[in-house]
Image (cartoon, rainbow, N blue to C red):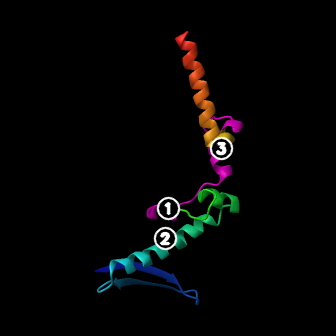
Amino acid sequence: MKIQRVVSTRLDSGETFTATIVIDYSGVDQQSILEWATSNRVIAFQRSLRKLTRDECKDLANGGNIITIHAPNAGHKIESESERINRLVGMGIPRHVAELAVRNPEALASITAEVENDDNDETDE
């Protein structure tokens, strides 16, 4: 199998060179191709991580050091905590609720469930 792409590169001399590159995968096993593709996705994901704080990176790893990401999303921007809060505030959610939603979604879910139960109790009466 062969894949071709048009590649444009700025040379150290300042000139631009454009060519069609053909990558020939003949005789290469599937595992090797996946490993090469993974290298590309890792580099793309690292670009996204650079914008985050160490704590935000740890949050992505659920407090550990393993992050699972779907390959097509690896290069997409990752919203920081403050960006997520500001997005919710921009949608009309009060800041303290937005902060709770982002920083402690389990607590927000618990509070929401209690409020819904209280509302149901009032309608039953």
The reply to whether discs 2 and 1 touch (Cβ–Cβ < 8 Å) is yes
Mark 2 vs mark 3: which is more N-terminal?
2
Farthest top residue?
A: 125
Residue 114 shows which numbered tag? none
Mark 3 vs mark 1: which is more N-terminal?
1
Residue 69 shows which numbered tag? 1
Crowding at mark 2 (Cα within 10 Å: few <14, some 14-19, many 20+)? some
Residue placed at 59% from the left, 60% from the top?
A: 61
In this picture, residue 21 sits left or right of residue 81? left
Compute the Cα span from label 3 to label 1: 22 Å
Q: Position of residue 89 (x, y in %)?
A: 65, 39
95 in relation to 82, above or below: above
Picture quarter with the C terminus = top right
Residue placed at 54% from the left, 87% from the top?
A: 11
Compute the Cα span from label 2 to label 1: 10 Å
Residue 104 shows which numbered tag? 3
Residue placed at 71% from the left, 37% from the top?
A: 96
Compute the Cα span from label 2 to label 3: 30 Å
Q: Which residue is mark 2?
A: 41
Residue interval drawn in magenta: 68-97
